[in-house]
Image (cartoon, rainbow, N blue to C red):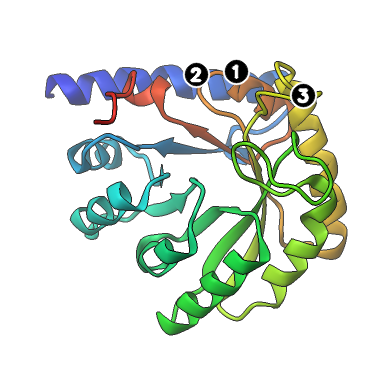
């Protein structure tokens, strides 16, 4: 086993133990939570090692990094998630490899994703990104739609050709009433998810929690956690 593979295997084992322990504490089954490894700034070789170690879900937040990496790993059985803020001029590229876009936060993006998915003859999973720090009608500092805009955006996704409404995503806010209160933020997301599922029963994916707060997300009921640093190490600085 190479040094890098041994390192990633050890890190994955630690993250797995954290998820399993959190599930046990919350009275949940381990299989209720899917680990997504965020591989931004790391090379395709790391993605290949992760696949060898059993990882099947990976995420990226910049198309310029993700597109060549996805091409280099096209032979692997992976589900690719796009989690970054997405500009409409990158949509065509992103829809060529992403299976799920977790950062849908405005109607203009829904229209662009739908057109690209139809053109590429693909069905693209979409999550509404919820900004718990955003006031009504505004977007969050890190992207996302205010809670009162979720239903309208979800309906637009549900009606758009080529798109599938899978659920909700959030990033724990750095400002506002939920700053430093990750568990409260994730509980609020679950409340919004419950209301959404009343009208869209299949939209049951809840993506929340990262390396520093995955326990809070699992306790709240998240179905997917997005972990980067705890698996891959401290990220190299982007030049």
Residue nearest the observer in this picture, 135 or 38: 135
Is tag 3's residue or tag 1's residue first in the polypeptide sequence? 1
The secondary element bearing badge 2 is classed as helix
> Hey, which quadrant is residue 200 in on the image?
bottom right
Residue nearest the observer in this picture, 202 or 137: 137
Instruction: Identify the residue at horizontal 34%, vertical 18% (top origin).
Output: 234
Residue 66, percent from left and from top: 32, 50
Is tag 3's residue or tag 2's residue first in the polypeptide sequence? 2
User: Is the residue marked by circle 2 packed among few (<14), some (14-19), or many (20+) residues within 10 Å?
Assistant: few
Visible in this render: residue 12?
Answer: no
Q: CA distance from mark 3 to mark 2?
A: 27 Å
The secondary element bearing badge 1 is classed as helix
Residue 103, percent from left and from top: 57, 51
Q: Is residue 159 left or right of residue 4?
A: right
Instruction: Identify the residue at horizontal 65%, vertical 25% (top origin).
Output: 23
Residue 51, percent from left and from top: 29, 42
Residue placed furthest toward the left: 2
Residue assigned mark 1: 21
Residue assigned mark 3: 178
Visible in this render: residue 138?
Answer: yes
Q: CA distance from mark 3 to mark 1?
A: 25 Å
Q: Are marks 3 and 2 in contact (CB under 8 Å)?
A: no
Instruction: Identify the residue at horizontal 28%, vertical 30% (top origin).
Output: 238
Residue assigned mark 2: 17
User: Is the residue marked by circle 1 packed among few (<14), some (14-19), or many (20+) residues within 10 Å?
Assistant: some
The secondary element bearing badge 3 is classed as loop
Q: Are marks 1 and 2 in contact (CB under 8 Å)?
A: yes
């Amino acid at each position: 086993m190479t040094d890098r593979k041994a390192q990633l295997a050890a890190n994955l084992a630690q993250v797995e133990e954290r998820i399993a322990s959190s599930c046990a504490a919350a009275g949940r089954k381990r299989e209720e939570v899917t680990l997504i490894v965020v591989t931004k700034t790391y090379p395709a070789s790391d993605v290949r090692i992760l696949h060898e170690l059993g990882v099947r879900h990976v995420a990226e937040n910049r198309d310029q990094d993700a597109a060549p990496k996805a091409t280099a790993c096209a032979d692997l059985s992976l589900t690719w998630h796009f989690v970054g803020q997405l500009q409409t001029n990158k949509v065509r590229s992103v829809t060529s490899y992403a299976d799920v876009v977790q950062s849908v936060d405005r109607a203009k993006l829904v229209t662009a994703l739908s057109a690209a998915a139809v053109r590429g003859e693909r069905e693209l999973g979409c999550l509404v990104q919820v900004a718990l720090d955003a006031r009504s009608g505004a977007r969050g500092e890190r992207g996302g739609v205010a809670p009162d805009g979720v239903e309208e955006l979800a309906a637009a996704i549900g009606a758009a050709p080529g798109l599938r409404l899978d659920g909700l995503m959030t990033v724990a806010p750095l400002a506002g009433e939920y700053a430093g209160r990750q568990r409260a933020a994730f509980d609020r997301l679950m409340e919004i998810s419950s209301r959404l599922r009343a009208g869209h029963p299949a939209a049951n994916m809840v993506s929340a929690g990262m390396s520093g707060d995955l326990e809070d997300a699992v306790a709240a009921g998240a179905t997917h956690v997005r972990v980067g640093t705890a698996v891959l190490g401290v990220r190299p600085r982007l030049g």
